[in-house]
Structures are given as structure tokens and as C-alpha cells.
Amino acid sequence: MKLLEETLAGIEPADNACREEARRYIDTLTMPRRALGRLLDLAEELAAMNRTLKFSAARKEIVLMAGDHGIVAQKVCPQPSSVTTQMVYNFVRGGAGINVLSRVARAHVSIVDMGVASDLSGLVQAGAVIDCKIAPGTADFSRGPAMSREQAVAALEAGIRVAQQLAPKVDVFATGEMGIGNTSPSSAIVAVLSGLTDPAPFVGRGAGLDPSKLAHKAAVIRRGIEVNRPDPADGVDVLAKVGGFEIGGIAGLVLGAARLHKPVVGDGFISSAGALIAAALSPASRDYMILGHGSAEPGHVAMAKLLGKQPLLDLGMRLGEGTGAALALNLLDAASAIMNEMATFESARVTEEGLK
């Protein structure tokens, strides 16, 4: 608990003075005012986070948190939990969607075992997976808490430690995940933090659930909220009652990165659930969050609204893994290049007349 408390106490808002300085500098660049639209908004956000106009986004780290979920026993998804382990091996071999798109973005992927049901010690010993396993999967939250409060804190602190360990070689973090069944806790989290007991508006197909079974999935999640009565004013309680180990790890990573003034590009639905837990614990951590893309899961619009963020991309994606964040990382490269490479009117000897 000490690490979590120290991290929360150390998170500072982004530097608004630097944001304003970036805006003034952008107005001197050789283009009509705000001609690059939201890319310039992103550049200003990054300047405020990094506390410098000449920031870099070159060293990118996608942290993929993996964990299993007891709620799968309630048949809320079509795949068995064993697919989580199978996909972890696919990540290690470099054959998954996130591996392909991370290579496009020139980003490194770190895989973290937060609570996979299988024994991954061989991959850990080989250096392919970071071991932060809290337990081999959460409990079925439709019958009781997903985890103890102590386990929730342990998951958060594991994410903080991962951020601390990787930060010296990272300019920007991105979040990803793998965990069969994890759209159910994510739907529960956004429902609770929206002040609702009915999760139905936030429940989607996840990894391909038949539309005819959505009502059953919503009923199971609703029962979990009713049984556990998570306190929306206590992010740790929400995580413990209806969350997941990988969701806690993502939340901790966001908090740890915010403490170190490092930007975090969030992926879709599950990553945003982690971001919501982080924001519940530290509202200032929102200043370091960038929403990479808008998920096709129906609850993601509400998540973005709660976070006060507009997704950079909206491509109808719902794969997870960090794929949307990986695509968005290319925009951070562009924002950095604008601030570091574009000529000013003065340096290029171009008249500003008529361009403002």
C-alpha cells in the first residue's frame, strides 16, 4: 500500500504554462493558423506532459497485461480461458495483431503476466514475460468479489513497478491487454463509475458473443454489481469487487507513468477500464492519458466521456491487445516531428500576411 500511496501523492498536473508556450510556438510555424487541426492539440498536450516543447516520442513501449477471469464460468463469452494462454504464446512468437502493428509503429512490446491461469514460468525464465502474477485468475464476481482488496492493491502496485522499471528507456507508454472474459469486468466498471446498476447499455459482444446472448451477459454483470455493491468513490474497491488483475495492472501503469510525467496512450475498452480506475484514484493522472482509438464496444463512448477524452482514431476496431494504441503512436511521432522539425515564419523567411 505504501508504494500506491506514495505514487498518488506524487502525481502532478501537466504543465499548463508549457501548453500555452507550445500554442504560441505553433502559431509561428509556416502554415495557416491551426491548419493541422487536432494534431496540434496533441502536440500541445505532449508538451505539457513532458514539460518541454521539444519532446520525443521515439522510444515507445506497449505494455500488454494478461490475466484470466472467473466470470467466464457464467458463459459470458464464447471462448474458453485457455485461449488467454495460447495468445500469450502467440505474442511471444510475434504473430499476433499487436506484434504486427507494433513493428509498424517501431514500438517494443512487454508482456506482463498479471494473473494468467496457466503456469508461465518457462516464459518468465526465458525473459519473454514479466512475472507479476497476483493469482491464477480472478474469482467469479457474479458470486462475490473478483479479488481481495489486498490483491487489488498488489495489482496496482505491480503496474506502478513495471512503469518505474521501464521508464528510463521510454518516452511514451501504451497499454494493451489479453484476458478472455475481460469485457465483462470492464462493462461493470464503467457502469459503476457512471452511477448505474444496470450495465446493459455498456455490454457488447466482446470476442464474438452471439447477439442473442447479450441479455444473459448483461444479467450476469448486473448480478455481480448487486452482489458486491462496489463503492464508486473508491477506485480500489471497484477494482476489487468487479475488476481484473490485468485491469489493475493497467491502472497502476497509468499512475506510475503519470508520476514520472510520461504520456500513456490507451487502447480500447479494457485499457479504458484501467484508465478509469486510475482516474478514480488520481484525477490528475488524466492529464497524462491519450485515448488512442474509439472501440466498437458500446460502453466505450461513456468511458471516453468519463475520462474527458476524445479518441485520436475511430476505425471500428475491437481487437484489444493494444492494437489501437499502436496505430495512434504514429500520430505522436507526427506531433513530435512538427514541434522539432517544422520551420517558423522567421527562420524560413516566409511572410505571415493573410495566413492568420
Image (spheres, rainbow, N blue to C red):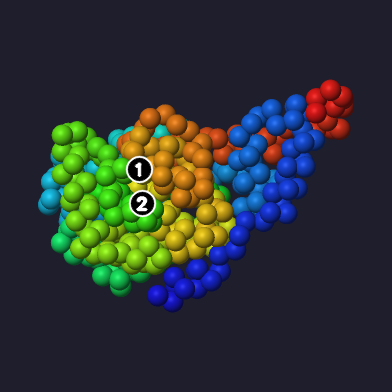
Q: Measured from the top left, where is residue 145 in percent x and y?
A: 22, 65
* Nearer-the-camera pick, 325 or 76: 76
Q: Is residue 135 above or below residue 305?
A: below
Q: Which residue is mark 2?
A: 190
Q: Which residue is mark 1?
A: 299
Q: Is residue 9 left or right of residue 182?
A: right
Q: Secondary structure at mark 1?
A: loop
* Nearer-the-camera pick, 205 or 343: 205
Q: Is residue 298 left or right of residue 179?
A: right
Q: Residue at x 55, y 60 (%)?
A: 284
Determine if residue 316 is in view.
yes
Q: Is residue 329 left or right of residue 36?
A: left
Q: Is residue 307 left or right of residue 196?
A: right
Determine if residue 159 is in view.
no
Rendered-image quadrant of the N terminus:
bottom left
Label for residue 1?
none
Identify residue type, mark 2.
Answer: Val
Q: Measured from the top left, where is residue 204 in percent x and y?
A: 27, 39
Q: Residue at x 58, y 57 (%)?
A: 261
Q: Residue at x 42, y 29 (%)?
A: 315
Q: Is residue 207 above or below residue 2?
A: above
The number of numbered badges drawn on the structure is: 2
Q: Residues within 10 Å of mark 1 (few under 14, many from 20)?
A: many
Q: Residue at x 27, y 50 (%)?
A: 198
Q: Measured from the top left, where is residue 9 in percent x and y?
A: 53, 71
> How far apart are the alpha carbons under marks 2 and 1?
7 Å
Outermost residue, bottom side: 2
Q: Check contact, mark 2 vs mark 1: CB within 8 A.
A: yes
* Nearer-the-camera pick, 139 or 59: 139
Q: Secondary structure at mark 2?
A: helix
Q: Residues within 10 Å of mark 2 (few under 14, many from 20)?
A: many
